[in-house]
Amino acid sequence: MVKAVLFDAGDTLFRVRGSVGEAYAAVAARHGVVVAPADIEPRFRAAFRRMPPLGFPAAAPAELPDREYAWWKAVAAASFAGLSFANFDAFFRDLFEHFAAADAWALFPDALPALRALQARGLRLAIVSNFDGRLLPICDGLGIAGLFEAIVISGRVGYAKPDPRIFEIALAGLGVAPAEAVHVGDNEREDLAGARAAGLRALLVERGGGAAADRVSALTELAELV
């Protein structure tokens, strides 16, 4: 019997408001660098894909915020390679703070109704996300933090999806077995394969997509499936 539902965060429960390219370009413009969002978006995505997992298993807890900051700074530096900032450190500080605010993100319309429906059925909820410490205030600002018993962040626990250990940490926090949980996300490798490797049932959300055994087209379908 299913007792818990785990969720990915970004692009599952909420998304960047507008686009990453638009945000990067807007903040860069405030620091004297003019780029087109359509040009910076693919550069960001390529830089993001090249990065190692956002998890620092050997780091002491006090080091983690700085490690996370440096990880994202490397992404930004690669995204803007070849472009000159008068003060890149100041630019990146503003960029990092921009994405720490809930206003930079938009909750998907199906997220809150789905979470409330699952909670009303007595299911326990958690987030398992390849994110950093900003996820906590983001969820709070979006009004969903209180719906989750655990919010497990790769940057803080040392392991990033698809590593099964991040799922195991979430399950341990909830006190449920893998067979008693379902994980929902948007990425085949990180969410579908990762959760299955940890022994969970996994579902992908593909909004506007067709029906499939391991996919839902809206989070509001979950209440019937689990």
Image (cartoon, rainbow, N blue to C red):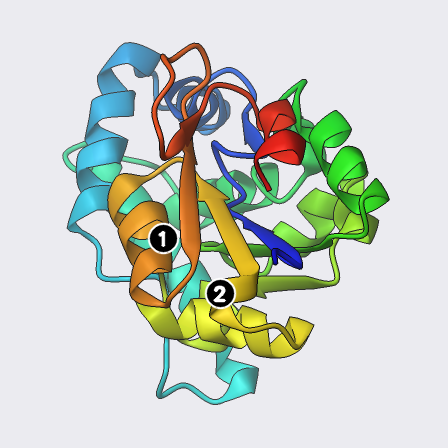
Label 1, on which residue?
73
Measure how far apart labels 1 and 2 are at the Cα level.
38 Å
Q: Nearer the viewer, mark 1 or mark 2?
A: 2
Q: Quadrant of the N terminus?
A: bottom right
Residue 152 seen anywhere in this rendered image of the structure: yes
Q: Nearer the viewer, residue 46 or 154?
A: 154
Q: Nearer the viewer, residue 157 or 194?
A: 194
> On the picture, is 76 further left or further right than 51?
right
When asked about the image quadrant of residue 124, the answer is bottom right
Residue 76 percent coordinates (x, y)? 32, 43
Residue 62 percent coordinates (x, y)? 56, 84
Residue type marked 1: Lys
Q: Which mark is residue 179?
A: 2
Q: Please tell me how crowded label 1 is: few (under 14), some (14-19), or many (20+) other residues with Cα within 10 Å.
A: some
Residue type marked 2: Ala
- Tell whether label 2 touches label 1 (CB within 8 Å): no
Q: Which mark is residue 122?
A: none
* Rendered residue at 41%/86% (across/down): 59
